[in-house]
Amino acid sequence: MTPESNVRAADIHYRIWNEFLEMPGLRLTLGQACRLWDIDPATGAGVLQDLVDAAVLRQVGGYYVRADLGRFTA
């Protein structure tokens, strides 16, 4: 991986995580995420899996949601 691709990967991770932070109820399929962020499915799957592995997102069925969604009560 080149330094430029490392920067791009970090930017994509940050951009996706930031969207989930700004919209706590956001839930997206892989296809929806790829269209929203204009990324190819392989990149999208990798980034979303990285965020699941980091415990900031979780996968519920075919959807990706914030990992803390539903864990707090009002």
Image: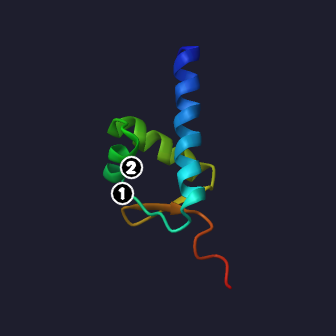
From the top left corner, tell me how far across and down residue 70 is, in percent: 58, 76
Secondary structure at badge 2 equals helix
In the image as oriented, which residue stretches furthest toward the bottom?
Answer: 74
Residue 62: x and y in percent read 36, 62
Q: Are marks 2 and 1 in contact (CB under 8 Å)?
A: yes
Amino acid type at image mark 1: Thr
User: How many marks do you count on the picture?
Assistant: 2
Q: Residue at x 55, y 40 (%)?
A: 13
Q: Which mark is residue 29?
A: 1
Identify residue type, mark 2. Ala
Q: CA distance from mark 2 to mark 1?
A: 6 Å
Picture coordinates of residue 39, whole percent (x, y): 37, 36
Is residue 46 shown left or right of residue 54?
left
| Residue that appears at 64% across and 76% down | 71
Say which residue appears at 49% left-offset and 41% top-offset. 47
The image shows residue 8, relative to residue 64, as above or below, that is: above
Q: Quadrant of the C terminus?
A: bottom right
Colour mapping:
rainbow
Q: Could you say which quadrant of the image residue 72 lies in?
A: bottom right
Farthest front residue in view: 22
- What residue is disc 2 on? 33
Which element type, helix, strand or loop, lies under badge 1?
loop
Q: Is residue 62 above or below residue 50?
A: below
Q: Position of residue 14 (x, y in %)?
A: 59, 41
Please tell me the numbered disc located at residue 20.
none
Nearest the viewer among 17 and 45 is: 17
Label 2 Cα crowd, 10 Å radius (few <14 / some 14-19 / many 20+): many
